[in-house]
Every structure is written in C-alpha cells, then in structure tokens.
Amino acid sequence: MAHDENLTAQELPNYIKERGGIGKITATKEEEESNKNIKEHKEAKTQMLKKILQANAKSAQTIVQVDDQFVLNTVVEGKKEGMFEFAVCVNPGGNERRVVRFFKVNQATESQLLNLISEASMPDDLEAMQEKLDVLREKLGITSGWGMKPGDKGYQPSGLPAINSAVQPEVMLNAPQSTTVGGVTIHQPA
C-alpha cells in the first residue's frame, strides 16, 4: 500500500493510524476493487441494453411520427445528445398508453435511465445475452448499423457484398482478380 500511495517511511505510521490500522486499509483496497468491478459490469450491462434496443428497433412495429414541437430538447449547450429519445406516457387504464411528450436527453442522463432499465430487466450473464443478441441480429438480417460494430459476430461493412463462408475453396480459386463495388475497383493479387 505504501508503494501505491508513494509514501515515505516517515509518513507510513501516520497513514496507517489515520485509516484505522492495516486491516482496515486492506479492506478498503479490496472494497475499491470490488466497487470498480461492479461499476464496470453495470456499464457493460447498459451497453448491452443499448445494442439490444437498437437491434429491436429494426423490427419495431410501433412507429410514431411526431412533430418536432412535441419533442422537448433538454440537452444544454456543450453537452452531447444521447442516441435515444424518451417518451412520457400516461396509462388511463388497461392496455392503453397515451404518449404525452418526447424528450431528447444528454448522454449522461441517457446512461442513468438505461442503467436503471438494465438493472431491472437484464440478467447479469452478459455472455448469454450476447449470444441471444447474435441470434436476434441474424434473424433480423442485421450485418451493420442498428448498434452493430466491427468485430461483432456477423458484421459486414455496409455497401460491400456479403461474404458467404459456405463458398467452396475451388470456387475461390476461379474467382475474378478484381471486382467493382460502389464505383470502387478492388484488385486482388494473383
């Protein structure tokens, strides 16, 4: 600990005394590490929720067209706007929901709201959630956009032809040496 805090030999006794002894210092360090891990996991859950919401948006059946006069922009100058908009609805009873107002919020507020939602609605097993997201994306035909980024399973840059992993090696041997995609010719060495 003394090394981590850059303490001199003279400062060490006071440091230990101020923090309630060596046992408390160790517990505090372990608590900090645990809190850091919990925070990172919550952030990962929130990011997973964002990806799931974006994928679900592709096939959403409830599409609302709203005049800008009904969208309140709460993002103050100098803050970055979040990617999602939020709606305030009233439930007069039963299954009916009445949308009262839409809100644009900054990224920090968006993260707080999505964090609350992810904690209330998502399991902690992010690997299982990622597998489900991969299946959802495949079913919806999502290969780019809708929250998908390079490195995600099934990602294909938009505008490029799909790569089919089922192509036989013999076919690849006879493939053309150049191809044109979107006005750009790509030459492959022989």
Image (cartoon, rainbow, N blue to C red):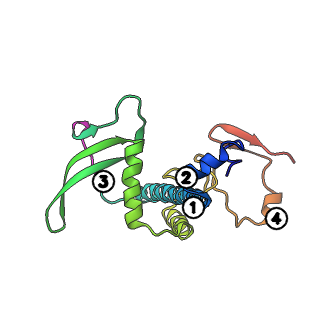
Q: CA distance from mark 3 to mark 4?
A: 47 Å
Q: CA distance from mark 4 to mark 1?
A: 62 Å
> Taking 55 as reference, is 148 left or right?
right
- Sequence-first tag of 1 and 3: 1
Nearest the viewer among 15 and 39 is 15
Callout in the foreground (1, 3): 1
Magenta stretch: dominant secondary structure = loop
Q: Which mark is residue 27?
A: 1
Residue 89 location, quadrant? bottom left
Q: Which contiguous range is marked in magenta? A: 64-69
Which residue is tagged 3? 63
4 or 1: tag closer to the N-terminus: 1
Decide which of 96, 126 is in the foreground and name it.
Answer: 126
Q: How many marks?
A: 4
- Which element type, helix, strand or loop, lies under badge 2? loop
In terms of secondary structure, where does tag 3 sit?
loop
Q: Which residue is mark 2?
A: 19
91 displayed left or right of 19: left
What's the residue at 59%, 46% (across, down)? Answer: 159
Instruction: Let me know if residue 39 is in the magenta part.
Output: no
| Residue type (three-letter) at the residue carrying disc 3 | Ile
Indicate the position of residue 2 as horizontal and vertical percent values. Answer: 68, 49
Residue type, label 2: Arg
Mark 3 or 2, nearer chain start: 2
Which residue bears the numbered disc 4? 170
Which of pointers 2 and 1 lies earlier in the amino acid sequence? Answer: 2
